[in-house]
Image: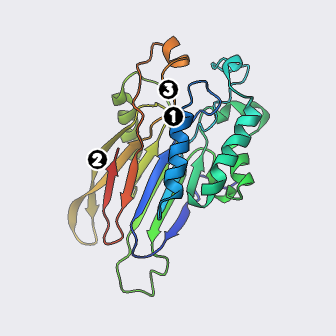
Amino acid sequence: MLSELEPIIFDAPAGRDVKIYPIADLHYGSMQFNMKRWEDFVTKICNEDDSYIILAGDLIDNGTKSALTNCFDETCRPAEQKRWVAEQLKPIADRVLCAVSGNHEARNRDVDDLPLYDICAKLDIEDRFRENGCFLAVRIGSDRKKCSVYRPAYSFCVTHGAGGGMYIGSALNRNERFVSAMDGIDVLITGHTHKPATFVGSKLVFDLQNKRVSTKQFYSVVASSWLNYGGYAMKKMYTPTGQTLTEIHLSSHGKDIRVTM
C-alpha cells in the first residue's frame, strides 16, 4: 500500500477541459441511501467525455456491532456492501483518479481490514488508493516538454474529513486551517459533514527570486452525501442537508478553476 505522501499523477488528454466530481458519503447499506440519485449519476458520467471522479470515503455504511450505526437497520451486510460498490464502480473504474478511506471504512481497523482498498484492488486500481489522504496532480497533456503549447497542471489534496459540528462553518473553518499548512495546493476536497459547500481562499506568496509578493488562490470543496433525511440524523437532531452534485472544471487553455454546485 502506498503512502499518502506519494502523489498520484494523472495526465489528461491535451487540449480538452476536464471535469471532476468529488464523491463522498455514499453510505451504501444505510436505509436512507438514495439509490435513484446514484443510478442517475452513473448513467450521466458514462455518457460524458473527459469527466472523472474522486472518491473521498464512506462509500459503505459498514454498520458493525460496535459502531454507533444500528447494524440491524442495514439493508445488507458489510461484505455485500463492499461487493455492491465494486460492481457499481466497474463501468467507471477508469474515471477514478484517487480513493481515500472514510471513518465508516475505518471501523474495520481492529481487524486490519480496509474495505475501500479491497474495492480498488478488485477493480485493479489499488495504486490509486491512499488510506488517510491523497495528493493528486492533474496535468492536461502528458508530453509537456516536447510541446510549446502551455499545458496547465492542477494540484489536489483529498481527505475524508474529521470532527463534528452542527453547522457548515465548522467544516469550512477546519478545511481552511488544514489547507493553510500546505503550499502549492489548488483544491482541497473533503466530505464527512454531509453539508455540501465550497469557498475560495487565498494565500500570500513571497517570491524571492522575482522579488515580489503575490497571492495564490485555492478552493476548498466539501462534497455532498447521498442520504435522504431520517434515521441517525433524526435521532441526533441534525438538520437536513442539501443533496447536490459538485463539479470542478479545469481549463485546458490556461490555468483556471471553476466550481459549480
- Where residue 151 appears, x then y in whole percent? 38, 75
Q: Residue at x 21, y 61 (%)?
A: 213
Q: Which residue is mark 2?
A: 201
**For numbered disc 1, what is the local secondary structure?**
loop
Asked if residue 101 is positioned above or below residue 1 in the image, the reply reads above
**For numbered disc 3, what is the local secondary structure?**
loop
Asked if residue 189 is positioned above or below residue 143 in the image, the reply reads above
Q: Residue at x 30, y 62 (%)?
A: 256
Q: CA distance from mark 2 to mark 3?
A: 31 Å
Residue 201 vs residue 237, the one in the foreground = 237
Q: Which residue is mark 1?
A: 226
Q: Residues within 10 Å of mark 2 (few under 14, many from 20)?
A: some
- Where residue 31 appears, x then y in whole percent? 61, 24
**For numbered disc 2, what is the local secondary structure?**
strand
Give the number of callouts.
Answer: 3
Residue 69 vs residue 247, the one in the foreground = 247
- In this rendering, which labeled residue sits more in front, label 2 or label 1? 1
Instruction: Name the amino acid type tagged 1.
Output: Trp
- Where residue 135 appears, x then y in whole percent? 51, 55
Q: Residues within 10 Å of mark 3 (few under 14, many from 20)?
A: some
- Where residue 150 appears, x then y in whole percent? 34, 78
Residue 160 seen in the current view? no
| Apparent side of residue 161 relative to residue 210 in the rendered image (left or right) | right
Q: CA distance from mark 3 to mark 1?
A: 7 Å
Q: Which residue is mark 3?
A: 228
Q: Which mark is residue 5?
A: none
Q: CA distance from mark 2 to mark 1?
A: 27 Å
Q: Quadrant of residue 126?
A: bottom right
Name the image quarter holding the C terminus.
Answer: top left
Instruction: Name the amino acid type tagged 3.
Output: Asn
